[in-house]
Amino acid sequence: MSEIRKELKYLSSHEWARVEEDGTVTIGITQHAQDALGDVVYVEMPEVGSTVSIGEEAGVVESVKAASDIYTLVSGTVVAINEALQESPETVNSSPYDDGWFFRVQPDDLDELDEALSADDYRELLESEE
Amino acid sequence: MGNKTVLYSTHQAMNGKLVDFGGWDMPLHYGSQIEEHHKVRQSSGMFDVSHMTVVDVKGADAKAYLQGLLANDVSKTEILLGKALYSGMLNPQGGVIDDLIVYNMGSWFRTVVNCGTREKDLAWMNKVAADFQVELIEREDLAMIAIQGPEAIARTKAVVSKACAALIDSLAIFQGLASDGWFIARTGYTGEDGLEIMIPNTEAVAFWNALAEAGVAPCGLGSRDTLRLEAGMNLYGHEMDDSISPLVANMGWTIAWQPSERNFIGRDVIQAEKTTGVKQKLVGLILRERGVLRAEQLVTIEGNSEKGVITSGTFSPTLGYSIALARVPTGALTGSHCFVEMRGKQVLVEVVAPNFVRNGKQVF
């Protein structure tokens, strides 16, 4: 079973979200997702200042094997993207929950995160997929 | 559960990510397929290719049989004991049943065919064999390990018997010879120098482990695919299949048209096709900006209403951008451009000859 962090929220499409101290929300993909994708070679992110919405494609991650859309867990305005991934996309593989984060959102409504999966829900999902 | 090679537990112990490949549980990678790719281009890597099917062809008519069965002419191998020949095996409609390697073993021949096509290959080879004095012997007792890369030969020599090391030194490129139950060939599927070694199953694990200790990196099918694609080598089921002519699949060089009286299976159809002109051909595509070309994406050439299709596409670790092989209408010329539909967008790509990297260097 791949690493799942207790403090994060998850989507069934294998993104995670972390609420930062300043109220922004950081989005990335899970350990399970990077393992399934294999070596990541490109990451396409939303532009800083653009808006992202739940259920709409916010970015793309491409590995040697496949391309996969990235979804946000909260709607809002993008306040930062992880520029380092343009040069070193492999960071998504080596550090999916820390250095390999994708983008940060100023949420319109933080309560939207309540709809996302808890760590336990996400673990159950992975177990059912095995 | 799929078939397992004799190295299955070894792959598990080395943290191989095992996936189904043509009915076999095979390692995709042992951590990072890109790192494995670089190992082969820069030093040495090894692949378990024991899933491939080895069939020995023996008997008084072995040569005549293969001259009818294969589009290439095995008489070309008579110049040198152990000479290897790459060929398509065609059906009567001129499509490719499989691509294979045949080695001249002196009084008989050894063929190596793909694992995913094993059953139909054997059925066809046996059917054609009915008219000849030949015996087909499948060699399930043999494992096969490919050691590839600029340092592959030196590192292999360091762990084999003196007799085998001397044999390796004597090998020409595309030649294979036997010693003490081993068959060592200077062939491969990566675009690098290296060896493909067939050994008794009972000796495979020890040999693999010895190679690993000598610094040869274990590599999975993931890097095998990116390496062969960079080298512009076909993969059965992608660049060609039962419905694709070898002339369309960049295999024209593997067809021996002379002597004209050699009537190999499929000859009449592809000869007529050659005379009237092929309608499609295989080209290389490169995309220097972000994004990865993928198999089955559609290719549009300006001024041509007929679409082409990507047969294999990937990110090239050596070049740092995406490359692909594509089957396109013959109007698309090398050096021009075309468009590929990627995720709903038409993306401009360059058209080049279907060969990207050999011996670690860009070649287009």
Image (cartoon, coloured by chain):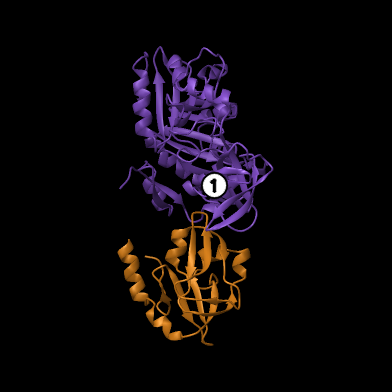
| Number of marks drawn | 1
Q: Please give the letter of the chain rendered in orange.
A: A
Could you tell me residue A53's position as x and y percent?
Answer: 49, 76
Could you tell me residue B350's position as x and y percent?
Answer: 65, 47
Left or right: residue B316 compared with residue B88: right
Q: Residue at x 51, y 19 (%)?
A: B74
Q: Nearer the viewer, residue B217 or B330?
A: B330
Number of other residues with Cα within 10 Å of mark 1, as a class: few under 14, some 14 to 19, many 20 or more? many
Which residue extends farthest bottom? Answer: A22
Could you tell me residue B217's position as x and y percent?
Answer: 52, 48
Query: For the C terminus of chain B, which image quadrant?
Result: top right
Location of residue B262 with respect to A42 vertically, above or below: above
Q: Residue at x 60, y 36 (%)?
A: B330
Q: Nearer the viewer, residue B149 or A8?
A: A8
Location of residue B156 with respect to B14 vertically, above or below: above
Q: Residue at x 63, y 64 (%)?
A: A87
Pointer 1 chain = B
Residue hosting label 1: B226
Query: Label 1's element?
Result: helix
Q: Colour of chain B?
A: purple
